[in-house]
Amino acid sequence: MSNISSDDVRAEVKKFWDFLSRKLKSQFAEMYLSSATVFAADARRMEPARLMLVRRERELLGPASFVAAKLGSIDVQPLGADLAIASYPFHLSITRTRASGKRYQSEVPRGRATQVFQRDEKGVLRIIHEHMSSAEPVSSKQLPPTDPPAQV
Amino acid sequence: MTKISSEDVRKEVRRFWAILSGNLADKLEEMYSPTAIVFTGKAKRSESAKLMAVRRSRHLPGTALSSRAEVGSIDVQIVGPDVAIAAYTYSFNTQKILANGSKVQINTTFGRATQIFERGEDRALRIVHEHLSAAAPPAMEKAGE
């Protein structure tokens, strides 16, 4: 099998944010291998991707939620034929719905992402590990119940 | 060729923090591959590990300053014959002398680390990618003499 190209990895990163912002739940979940692990931006601990997906689905993929991201330059480090690391800065605007039903708008102006992609048995690139963080504290504000999701 | 073992990776992670805490005289830059990329604690962009290691080495604690690292359980994913991902939480307490000569204590309580190791032709494990972050901003306080 040929080595992974940087363009293939960049295309997967763009697909990841496109699925998240368009709330395409199953396509978004398919981006992760079943053994994938994740450091979410605001989490103190690492968790299995399948747990993070349940939370992201509830908080970010519902009808009252909103996600918009602007990506910076994506660095790709290929590691052999089946593995590559993508790292990049991003600016994220989200409206999140908590389990209580309360909605919060957050800005992550200095987001940083590391995503490790591995080819699965069908040759599809999927995330095996993800580390998201913010270089600055994230500001959040609670939205009144009637506010529609903010548009950027 | 034998696969990388989880224990080898954990040993390298502990060596990394021993160097950073000033408890081991090994050179920090030798832990990184020449092409490694890192996200340090509060940098807005990734940078070459070479540059970062030189900068960090300049600030390694001498005899007058103390640093202490505590590393949580290290999760290791072996993702190829020569590549492994280490992911773990840590706390790091260090002292720093500011430009005005005063000493401060910086406590990173909820640190999170991803380090991706690759085995080179010389069989040594080196970091090819590192992402360090904190779930809460580090606390800074005046340190005693």
Image (cartoon, grey):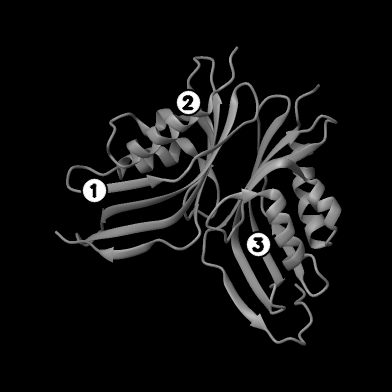
Which residue does the numbered mark 1 point to in the structure image?
B66
Label 2 packing within 10 angstroms: few (<14), some (14-19), many (20+) = few
Which residue does the numbered mark 2 point to in the structure image?
B8
The quadrant in which residue B52 appears is top left
The quadrant in which residue B109 appears is bottom left
| Alpha carbon distance from label 2 to label 1 | 27 Å
Location of the C terminus of chain A by quadrant is: bottom right
Label 1 packing within 10 angstroms: few (<14), some (14-19), many (20+) = some
Up the image or down, B16 lies above or below A71; here it is: above
Q: Is residue A126 visible?
A: yes
Location of the N terminus of chain A by quadrant is: top right
Secondary structure found at label 2: helix
Is disc 3 on the same chain as disc 2? Answer: no
Secondary structure found at label 1: loop
Marks 2 and 3: which is nearer the front? 2
The residue drawn where x is 32% and y is 29% is: B26
Which tag, 2 or 1, sits closer to the chain's start? 2
Label 3 packing within 10 angstroms: few (<14), some (14-19), many (20+) = some
The residue drawn where x is 30% and y is 45% is: B59
Which residue does the numbered mark 3 point to in the structure image?
A91
- Disc 3: which chain? A
- Disc 2: which chain? B
Disc 3 residue type (three-letter): His
Disc 1 residue type (three-letter): Ser
x, y percentage for residue A130?
A: 64, 46
| Alpha carbon distance from label 3 to label 1 | 36 Å
Disc 2 residue type (three-letter): Asp
Up the image or down, B89 lies above or below B85; here it is: below
